[in-house]
Amino acid sequence: MPVTDTAHSLFISDLHLCDSRPAISRLFFDFLQNTAIHADALYILGDLFEYWLGDDTLDVPLNQQVSLALRQLADSGVAVYFMHGNRDFLIATQFADACHAQLLTDPSLIDLYGTPTLLMHGDTLCTDDVSYLAFRAQVRDPQWQNQFLAQPLAARISIAQQARAQSESSKQEKATEIMDVNTVAVHEALRQHDYPRLIHGHTHRPAQHPIDIDDHHCQRWVLPDWYDKGGYLRCDTLGCQFVSLTV
Ligand code: LP5
Ligand code: MN
C-alpha cells in the first residue's frame, strides 16, 4: 500500500461484463490490479456480469478470467465481497469459492470505518416497477432456479435471450420514474436499519443524495454502471467519494 494511502474500501456494481465489450473487461482487470489492490476490501454490489447462467459456466473464458483475477486480489489480502444483481442472481458458492470471495445477502448492514452502511443491489427499492418485482419473485424461487439450472446450457441461453428481449420491450413502455427507487421504500430501508448510510447500484443513475428523515441525516450513494466508462466509490474514515475510470 502506498504510504500516503489511508485504509479504505471500494464499491462497484453494474459492470455487465460480457464478450461484446472487451474494453470494459480490460478496464476491470486493470482496476483490480492497480487500484483495488490497495484497498482493505472490494464490494461488488451486483450485475458484475451481463448474465450468469449457472456456476457450471465457470470454465467459459471470460468467467474464468474474472474468477482468477478476483482470486488473485483476494489472495493478496483484499477482502472480496459479492452481492447478487438482477442479471447474475444465479451466482452460487462454486463461483464465490473460485474467487475466494464471500457472498453477501441483500441487504447487508456493515460497519464501514465506524459508519453503519447498508449495502443493496437496489432493485428491491424500485417498488413502482411491479412487473419487474413479479419477475424477480419468480426467478428467485429456489424451485424455479433448480428447474432452470437442470436444463442444458443451450436451453438456458435461449431462455435468457427471450427474457432479455422481453425485458427491453417492457422497459420501452415504462416511465423512467418507475425504474428509479421509490422514496418510501428507501425511507423504510433506512428506518429498518436504524438510519445508516446507503450504497446501492442497479438504477445506473450515479449520485449522492442527502436524505433528512426522522431527525436523522442520511446519505444515499448510487453507483455508476460500466457501459461507456467505469467508476467506483471509495470510502474511508472521512467519508466517500466517486472516482471515474476512462476506457
Ligand atoms: O436488466 P435490465 O437492467 O435491462 O432491466 C432490469 C429489469 N429486467 C430484468 C430481466 C433481465 O434483464 C433478464 C435477463 C436475466 C439474465 C439471467 C439469466 C438467467 C435467468 C433467465 C430468466 C428467465 O431484470 C427490468 C426493470 C429494469 O431493470 C429497471 O429496474 O424494469 O424489468 C423488466 O423489464 C421485467 C419485465 O417488466 C417483466 C418480465 C419480462 C421477462 C419475462 C421472462 C420470460 C422468460 C421466457 C421463458 C421462455
Ligand atoms: Mn441491476
Image (cartoon, grey):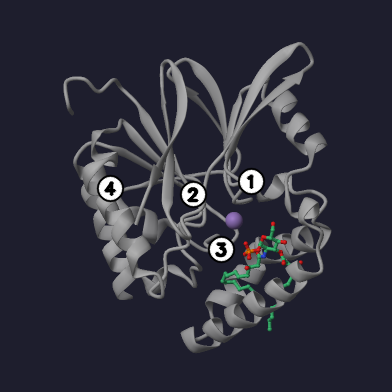
Please, what is the three-letter code of the amino acid marked with disc 3? Answer: Arg
The disc, 3 or 2, on the residue closer to the chain's N-terminal end is: 2
Do the residues under discs 1 and 3 have CB atoms within 8 angstroms? no
Residue 130 coordinates in the image, percent (x, y): 83, 58
- Quadrant containing ligand 1 reads bottom right
Do the residues under discs 1 and 2 have CB atoms within 8 angstroms? yes
Q: Is residue 172 left or right of residue 161?
A: right
Please, what is the three-letter code of the amino acid marked with disc 4? Answer: Leu
The disc, 2 or 4, on the residue closer to the chain's N-terminal end is: 2
**Can you tell which of label 3 and label 2 is closer to the viewer?**
2
Q: Is mark 4 within 8 Å of ligand 2?
A: no
Please, what is the three-letter code of the amino acid marked with disc 2? Answer: Ser
The disc, 1 or 3, on the residue closer to the chain's N-terminal end is: 3
Do the residues under discs 2 and 4 have CB atoms within 8 angstroms? no
Q: Is mark 2 within 8 Å of ligand 2?
A: yes
Q: Which residue is mark 4?
A: 32
Q: Which residue is mark 3?
A: 87
Distance in Å between CA atoms under marks 4 and 3: 21 Å
Q: Quadrant of residue 41?
A: top left
Residue 129 coordinates in the image, percent (x, y): 79, 56
SS under mark 2: loop
Mark 4 surroundings: few (<14), some (14-19) or many (≥20) residues within 10 A: some
Q: Is mark 1 within 8 Å of ligand 2?
A: yes
Distance in Å between CA atoms under marks 4 and 1: 23 Å
Please tell me whether residue 109 is drawn above or below residue 75 in the rendered image: above
SS under mark 1: loop
SS under mark 4: helix
Mark 1 surroundings: few (<14), some (14-19) or many (≥20) residues within 10 A: many
Q: Is mark 3 within 8 Å of ligand 1?
A: yes
Observer-nearest residue: 208 or 236?
A: 208
Q: Which residue is mark 1?
A: 122
